[in-house]
Image (tube, helix red, strand yellow):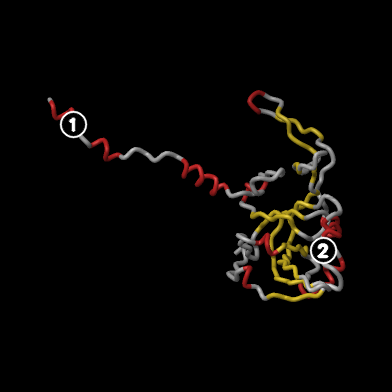
Amino acid sequence: MSRIYDDQKLQNLPLVNKSWPSSWGTGRWTGKGDGALIEGTVQNRHKVCITDSSGAKARYFILLVKATRAHRRKFDASGKEVEPNFSETTKVSTGFLNSSYKTEAKGKTDALTEAELSSLVTVPELTSLVKEMTTSDLLLLWLPEASAENLEIECGTAFRFKTQGNSPFLSSMTRQEGQWSTAANYAGGESVGASWTDKVMALKGSTPAAADPAADDVIGDDEWDD
């Protein structure tokens, strides 16, 4: 099998308690840079509770992810997120009815190498805090507990992740569904990789019901008058 099945629910993971020596706040890490858009599979996950010096608590799911590709997140001048430049070239139609194409330069790609991605999302002091959970060849990503509601996360499942700035903290993660994973709404609204099945079913539910075939067999009162 290409997929590792694990029927242990995310919420049932044992809680690991960790202490933070000062006031806990992720802004010191998430406020830097635009962040990354990552595609990869979850290989393992843990649940951790951080208690800071004041006694305040924050809960996260620690996800160990094998990245398959990654790009820098991009925003326009107004702060609206836009699609990254996935490739340095693009195909442009040159023939009638899209019968032929030519390749044109598209500009510098926003793709990240494995080393660049690791450097962008790795915070040594956070890695050290949960060092027993780390694996050298996997990314360590932090998902706030509140963001995990309605998410089914199984080992081996492919997701698209968005980090908050240049940090390991996630702003969102959505399940990839085959080839549809490349379709994205970067400005918000629908989740990236939103289920096409859900969309079809929603349309189906809004379609008027078909006429009752039995109605064709009903004889109108006026037919008895002849």
The image quadrant where one finds the C terminus is top left
Residue 62, horizontal then vertical, whole percent: 73, 67
Badge count: 2
Q: Residue furthest left?
A: 226
Looking at numbered disc 1 in the image, what kind of residue is underneath it?
Asp
Q: Nearer the viewer, residue 36 or 24?
A: 24
Q: Which residue is mark 2?
A: 25
The image quadrant where one finds the N terminus is bottom right
Labels 2 and 1: the sequence-earlier one:
2
Residue at the image point whose x is 83% and y is 53% from the top: 113
Q: Residues within 10 Å of mark 1 (few under 14, many from 20)?
A: few
Residue at the image point whose x is 65% and y is 23% from the top: 96
Q: What label sits on residue 221 in the rendered view?
A: 1
Q: Residue furthest top?
A: 96
Residue 206, horizontal then vertical, whole percent: 47, 41
Q: Nearer the viewer, residue 24 or 104?
A: 24
Residue at the image point whose x is 65% and y is 28% from the top: 98
- Helix, strand or loop for disc 1: helix
- Helix, strand or loop for disc 2: loop
In the figure, 154 relative to 31: above or below? below
Residue at the image point whose x is 73% and y is 61% from the top: 66
In the figure, 63 relative to 176: above or below? below
In the figure, 135 relative to 161: above or below? below
Where is residue 84, by image quadrant?
Answer: top right
